[in-house]
Image (cartoon, rainbow, N blue to C red):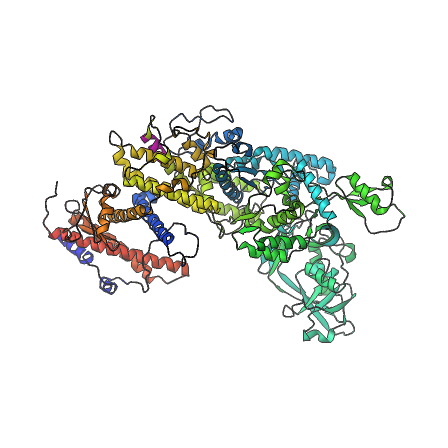
């Protein structure tokens, strides 16, 4: 044994050596090792760090230190086995007390021993709704009523589907803000609604009719088909409402809107008529995004730009075989009159060659100067085409010559318009070639025609090559088909003037975009905005209130005469004025098209409040206080709401827009049903097996290739399914993310929030047990802390209240979630409760801590309620009411704690002093871990070189001993020598902590254990030194790990030195 100890000592007995001295022990220190530093998880205060060299900066550093210390204590509390423990299914506790729907939940029974989301979330929501807590009429009667209003509308989700995590993020943020304003005393209106989703809904119903009855839409009359859609909406459209309730959304359901209900229809018609009268709405033949599968125009947001690196084969609807894209076909256009001269152009769309009306080159391109004004022979038809010059042509791209097809390219349409070229439409609405192409192509699918055209070019000797070519392909997100640009007579909204007003609103500060970096996109979009096509060739939607005056046969051809009216009678009257003919002689034919869904959605902020009628809701709650939505909707929805709202109501529809990040999957892709990567929030709330997730994918309409990718991703991400996390955990996790960068939410993150819920649950069970049945709370203003620990936790509570208030006022919810997480988990549970537990076991129990615990529970739960409404309600309802005041019936309408009312509890200097105590506790626990003192309670001495610091430690000696798991704790005078053989650690530059080891550690048994640990760390260190540096982030992590191991090695060397001293010094008797 002695030889073994001696061998161990050869490795372990090392004093604190300079870095170079480590080489003799086989260590190879990294050059430029970063200094170890504490990382703060405390949110940064506002303002420049350079300018805030004042008291606020000092408080900030104090908060950061506090976070690090308490987080460190929490980590030390966990055993290694506990921190590595994988998720195991928890027992599901159900609320089984008979309760009628809408009746208040019975909270007379004891709390279950562990947090169970299904138990907590049962029964509360129907009661909240029935009591009217979510209605502004109720809130105006609250004692804390401010007289101010707060109004928002939910971005109306499509009635066809279900909400995914992206929607859940919107709901979580909006509901937290709404609940905070309600508790604050504002009169709150949050309007629910859903969108009729014209294209998506019609497609779903058409699929269902074909699957169940073998019937196509055109086999039915328009009226019969619309009856089928309404029937489907009534049967299937309630799923979103059920999801919103599951998420705890505190919406005023009595004001629920649907963009196809009667009120919305009146608003849409009125908006169309007013815009037409103002000259902002017109009918014209222009290029539109066209889906040949849907046979309808589609909006820009329904066009996905898919980047192709080169040759790519895609399966498209209506095509039996894959279609090739990403290929550049070179075609020769012979020069008329010069047999050997030609101009070669490149195209990725040879199917549009029959629609070419010219070839264009740059006027300064010397390769074609001699051909200016000449004509070229069309390679298919032989017709003569002009060679024109235009500065828009890029001479360095390809051959520098481009074909001009005005009827099928937006860029060519602009170029053709400048040169007076007539467009030639060669692709029909259904994607087949038109009669203009000739009999040999007419009726062929455009992609079949592509192959035939290339074949003919080869035969005629005018084919000049084929090569890979990167390109961006426009895809219809609804059908998966390639979008065509077709010339169609449609209704358009003039956007330039309204767009300038919208841009100016942001520039002037009248409209705030948050985060502010979105202003750049806003300015760019409105400075380049074109007119908005609002016609859709569908049956489901708002039929356009425009009528064509049908000319009598034999009267000759005139330009179409269209009139717009709220009713046919009004339109007929206008038509009579325009034509000078009696109304009775006129035949009107209503436009069969419907309006773009985004048109009715753009009216939602005021149509949902009763516009065009001057309703009480419109007078009271418009403009809305805030518009919160995803950043992807900034332009297509928010921009159009601002344009139409300002034009139709004379006011901005809201003064602030809060935009949250995009939720993406682990591959960085946007959540999309077409990709199969969406997650139903209910699956995270309730938990779901992998098999069920896979069945949902198979029941969808995914492409086989995408299905395989999505299925594999699910198996990788959720090999054991998704554990039950609960609504509160999901909401809290979602609200913890800031607005910068995309959100890559993991289920493990939500699971961590569930553990946080369990921590709060256990804390309240403990507090309720301490309070007992006869406890009477003191009024908060009369509560006077009796110990420094009581003062400290109340100061932390006041600080948390201030941070939550700041987070909600600035609408930066991560400030609030971080402050609450830190208070409940670290300040209350890990520090205060552990410090006062020994005293609470005494009989009689001291009066101070129970009153403090009640205030922490009451105020802490009310702070938490906007973010975790179910858990907060469940626990708050069990607290005894404060005397002398009528308690609020629900925490959802209880007053939100005010920072100013708790300011008298805030003691920054006390917190600073206690942070030194926590540093000492952390040092002690580190020593205990090094020497593996798991059960012993060693004596401890503290020594400070600063005289004033002794008093700070003296006030907290008892909690220091409790938190440090020590025996007796004493103070060692500054001029007294350190005790021999005691372990020592530094706390900053002025404090030394000494911990007794004699009689508690067996050096002979412990030294080999330290040697083994050191050997293991040495191998890790050498391996990291030898590793080749990689990317910047990975290299930073490597350096940090090296620094951490080096620090641990130093601790082990120091521990070996102390153990050697114990072996050399004879044991002395312990003092009683």
On the image, which quarter does residue 856 sit in?
A: top left
Residue 380 position within the rendered picture, expressed as x and y whole percent measured from the top left: 75, 63
In this picture, which residue range is highlighted in magenta?
762-770
Residue displayed at 32% across by 59% down: 35
Residue most toward the right? 554
- Judge by depth and name the residue closer to the eye, 421 or 281: 281
Residue 302 position within the rendered picture, expressed as x and y whole percent measured from the top left: 63, 49
Q: Is residue 766 magenta?
A: yes
- Judge by depth and name the residue closer to the eye, 750 or 910: 910
On the image, which quarter does residue 552 sit in?
A: top right
- Judge by depth and name the residue closer to the eye, 458 or 790: 790
Residue displayed at 80% across by 45% down: 548
On the image, which quarter does residue 29 sit in?
A: bottom left
Residue 982 position within the rendered picture, expressed as x and y whole percent measured from the top left: 17, 50
- Judge by depth and name the residue closer to the eye, 601 or 87: 601
Q: Is residue 67 visible?
A: yes
Residue displayed at 81% across by 50% down: 560
Q: Is residue 858 magenta?
A: no
Residue 325 position within the rendered picture, expressed as x and y whole percent measured from the top left: 63, 58
Q: Main secondary structure of the magenta part?
A: helix
Q: Is residue 688 visible?
A: no
Q: Is residue 965 left or right of residue 114?
A: left
Please tell me how many numbered marks the rendered image carries: 0
The quarter of the image holding the C terminus is top left
């Amino acid at each position: 044994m002695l030889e073994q100890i001696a061998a161990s000592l050869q490795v372990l007995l090392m004093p604190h050596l300079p870095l170079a001295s480590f080489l003799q022990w086989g260590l190879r220190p990294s050059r430029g090792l970063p200094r170890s530093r504490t990382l703060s998880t405390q949110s940064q205060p506002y303002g420049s760090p350079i300018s805030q060299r004042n008291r606020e900066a000092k408080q900030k550093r104090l908060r950061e230190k506090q976070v690090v210390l308490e987080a460190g204590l929490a980590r030390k509390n966990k055993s290694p086995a506990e921190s590595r423990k994988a998720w195991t299914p928890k027992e599901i506790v159900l609320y089984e007390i008979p309760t009628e729907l809408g009746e208040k939940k019975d909270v007379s029974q004891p709390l279950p021993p562990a947090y169970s989301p299904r138990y907590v979330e049962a029964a509360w929501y129907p009661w909240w709704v029935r009591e009217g807590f979510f209605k502004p009429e109720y809130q105006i009667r609250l004692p804390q009523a401010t007289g101010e209003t707060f109004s928002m509308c939910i971005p109306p989700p499509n009635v066809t589907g279900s909400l995914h995590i992206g929607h859940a993020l919107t709901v979580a943020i909006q509901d937290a803000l709404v609940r905070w304003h309600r508790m604050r005393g504002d009169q709150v209106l949050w309007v629910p609604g859903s969108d009729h989703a014209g294209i998506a809904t019609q497609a779903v119903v058409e699929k269902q009719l074909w699957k169940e009855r073998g019937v196509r839409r055109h086999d039915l009359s328009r009226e019969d088909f619309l009856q089928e859609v309404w029937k489907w909406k009534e049967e299937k459209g309630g799923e979103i409402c059920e999801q919103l309730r599951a998420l705890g959304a505190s919406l005023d359901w009595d004001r629920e809107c649907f963009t196809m209900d009667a009120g919305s229809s009146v608003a849409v018609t009125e908006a169309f008529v007013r815009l037409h009268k103002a000259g902002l709405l017109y009918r014209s033949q222009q290029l539109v995004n066209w889906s040949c599968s849907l046979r309808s125009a589609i909006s820009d947001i329904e066009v996905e730009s898919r980047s192709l690196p080169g040759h790519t084969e895609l399966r498209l609807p209506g095509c039996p075989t894959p279609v090739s894209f990403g290929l550049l076909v070179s075609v020769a256009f012979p020069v008329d009159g010069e047999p050997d001269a030609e101009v070669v152009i490149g195209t990725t769309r040879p199917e549009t060659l029959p629609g070419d009306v010219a070839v264009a080159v740059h006027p300064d391109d010397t390769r074609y100067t001699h051909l200016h004004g000449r004509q070229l022979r069309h390679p298919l038809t032989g017709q003569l085409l002009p060679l024109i010059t235009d500065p828009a042509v890029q001479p360095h791209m390809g051959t520098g010559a481009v074909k001009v097809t005005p009827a099928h390219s937006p860029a060519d349409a602009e170029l053709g318009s400048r040169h007076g070229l007539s467009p030639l439409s060669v692709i029909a609405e259904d994607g087949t070639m038109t009669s203009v192409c000739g009999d040999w192509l007419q009726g062929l699918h455009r992609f079949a025609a592509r192959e035939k055209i290339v074949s003919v070019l080869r035969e005629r000797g005018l084919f000049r090559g084929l090569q890979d070519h990167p390109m961006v392909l426009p895809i219809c997100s609804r059908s998966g088909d390639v979008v065509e640009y077709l010339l169609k007579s449609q209704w358009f909204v003039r956007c330039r003037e309204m767009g300038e007003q919208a841009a100016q609103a942001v520039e002037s500060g009248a409209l705030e975009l948050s985060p502010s970096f979105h202003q750049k996109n806003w300015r760019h979009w409105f400075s380049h905005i074109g007119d908005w096509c609002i016609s859709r060739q569908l049956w489901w939607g708002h039929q356009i209130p425009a009528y064509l005056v049908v000319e009598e046969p034999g009267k000759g051809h005139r330009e179409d005469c269209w009139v717009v009216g709220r009713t046919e009678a009004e339109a007929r009257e206008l038509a009579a004025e325009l034509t000078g003919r009696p109304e009775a002689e006129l035949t009107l034919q209503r436009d069969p098209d419907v309006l773009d869904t985004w048109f009715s959605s753009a009216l939602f902020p005021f149509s949902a409040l009763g516009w065009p009628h001057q309703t009480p809701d419109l007078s009271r709650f418009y403009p809305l206080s805030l518009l919160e939505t995803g950043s992807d909707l900034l332009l297509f929805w928010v921009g159009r709401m601002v344009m139409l709202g300002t034009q139709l109501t004379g006011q901005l529809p809201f003064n602030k827009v809060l935009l949250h990040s995009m939720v993406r999957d682990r591959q960085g892709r946007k959540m999309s049903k077409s990709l199969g990567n969406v997650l139903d929030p209910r699956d995270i709330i309730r938990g779901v097996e992998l098999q069920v997730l896979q069945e949902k994918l198979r029941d969808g309409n995914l492409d086989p290739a995408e299905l395989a990718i999505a299925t594999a991703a699910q198996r990788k991400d959720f090999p054991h399914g998704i554990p039950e996390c609960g609504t509160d955990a999901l909401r809290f996790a979602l609200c913890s993310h800031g607005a910068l960068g995309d959100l890559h939410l993991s289920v493990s993150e939500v699971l961590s929030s569930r553990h946080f819920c369990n921590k709060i649950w256990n804390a309240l069970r403990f507090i309720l047990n301490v309070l007992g049945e006869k406890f009477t709370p003191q009024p908060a203003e009369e509560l006077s802390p009796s110990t420094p620990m009581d003062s400290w936790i109340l100061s932390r509570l006041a600080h948390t209240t201030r941070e939550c208030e700041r987070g909600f006022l600035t609408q930066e919810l991560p400030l609030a979630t971080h402050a609450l997480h830190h208070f409940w988990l670290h300040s209350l549970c890990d520090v205060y409760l552990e410090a006062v537990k020994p005293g609470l076991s005494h009989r009689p129990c001291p009066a101070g801590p129970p009153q403090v615990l009640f205030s922490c529970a009451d105020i802490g739960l009310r702070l938490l309620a906007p973010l975790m409404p179910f858990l907060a309600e469940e626990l708050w309802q069990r607290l005894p009411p404060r005397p002398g005041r009528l308690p609020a019936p629900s925490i959802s309408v209880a007053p939100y704690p005010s920072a100013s009312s708790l300011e008298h509890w805030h003691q920054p200097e006390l917190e600073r002093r206690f942070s030194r105590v926590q540093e000492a506790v952390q040092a002690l626990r580190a020593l205990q871990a090094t020497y593996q003192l798991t059960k012993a309670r060693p004596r401890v001495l503290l020594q400070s070189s600063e005289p004033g610091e002794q008093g700070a430690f003296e006030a907290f000696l008892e909690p220091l001993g409790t938190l440090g798991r020590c025996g007796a704790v004493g103070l060692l005078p500054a001029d007294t020598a350190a005790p021999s053989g005691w372990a020592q650690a530094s706390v900053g530059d002025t404090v030394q902590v000494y911990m007794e080891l004699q009689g508690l550690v067996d050096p002979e048994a412990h030294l080999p254990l330290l040697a083994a640990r050191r050997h293991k760390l040495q191998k890790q260190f050498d391996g990291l030194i030898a590793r080749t540096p990689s990317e910047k982030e990975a290299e930073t992590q490597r350096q940090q790990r090296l620094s951490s191991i080096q620090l641990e090695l130093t601790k082990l060397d120091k521990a070996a030195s102390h153990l050697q001293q114990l072996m050399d010094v004879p044991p002395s008797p312990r003092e009683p």
